Each structure stands twice: as C-alpha cells, then as structure tokens.
Amino acid sequence: MPPVADTPMVISTTRVFLVEDSELIRTRLVSMLAGVSGVDVIGHAESAADAIASILSARPDVLILDIKLKVGSGIEVLQKMKQRLPAMSVIMLTNYATEHYLKKCLGARAEYFLDKTNEFEQLRSIIEQLICHEP
C-alpha cells in the first residue's frame, strides 16, 4: 500500500473589518484582535461612504462598527450592509449606548451592541465565540 500523502491542514481565518473614526480606538481594537488566534483584521474605514465601498469589496465575516463617524452614520452602514451581506456578523461598538440607538441597531439586524466605555473588553470573547460557530 502506498504511503498516504501529507495533506495540508486548512486553517480558517475570520476576517474582521473595522469602521471607527478614532485612531486610538482602532489601534486598541487591532491590538486586542491580534491576540485572538484565527482573526485577521483586513481593513478599516473612518467614514460611511468609505466603509460601504471597502466592505463590499473585502466581504469580511465580521464588522465592528461605530455609530458616530466623522462623515456619515454607522447605522446607515449597518442598514446597507445587512441588505447586501446578510450573513456578515455586525458588532456595534459605541459611546452612544442609549436605548434609542440599541433599538435602532438591533432593528437593523446588528447581532451585538456594546458600550465602548463599559463593555469594550467583551469584544474579544464575542469574536472568539463567532470563530467557534463559523462553518
């Protein structure tokens, strides 16, 4: 019987895109996600228009999205992306964690809604859970 050829192990990577206008927060997110095995931050945008174009091109598995951007709204990005890429998981990460925005974001089909001030650190465990549940 001939030897079995070594088959390369396929490692799945979860592709994450950031929409955040604060360089400080983006740097903190990239640093946090670098410590999660199987995660690749594939890009970022600071405005709604740049985000929409870049996300449609990159087709990430997970989108981390702020509500207030320098130009445009994260809610606008959320609504457009869920129409075009409904399987993409969206995590809203905001300083505007009010009931009004919570309802608006969940109504637009965001899977998660986190307050930057109090829940930032939960993001890592959410990403790890999403990795475990990807096909």
Image: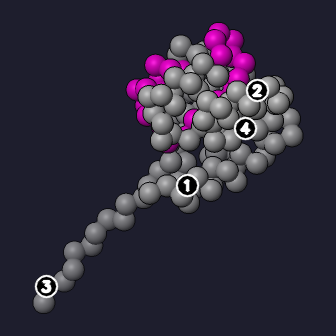
User: What residue did someone put label 4 on?
Assistant: 113
Indicate the quadrant containing the C terminus: top left, top right, bottom left or bottom right.
bottom left
Left or right position of 69 against 13 = right
N-term mark: 2 or 3: 3
Nearest-to-viewer mark from 1 and 2: 2
Considering every residue shown, the one lying at the far left of the view is: 1
Q: Do the residues labelled 4 and 1 touch (CB within 8 Å)?
A: no
Residue 41 on image: x %, y %: 55, 38
**What amino acid is found at the position of numbered circle 4 in the picture?**
Phe
Q: Give the range drawn in magenta.
A: 51-73
Q: How crowded is mark 2: few (under 14 residues within 10 Å), some or many (20 or more)?
A: some
**What amino acid is found at the position of numbered circle 1 in the picture?**
Ile
* In the rendered image, the vertical position of residue 121 relative to residue 27, given as above or below: below
**What amino acid is found at the position of numbered circle 2 in the picture?**
Tyr
Q: Are marks 4 and 2 in contact (CB under 8 Å)?
A: yes
Residue 131, numbered label: 1
User: What residue did someone put label 2 on?
Assistant: 101
- Which residue is nearer to you in this view: 76 or 127? 76
SS at circle 4: strand
Left or right position of 20 against 85 = right
- Which residue is nearer to you in this view: 41 or 119? 119
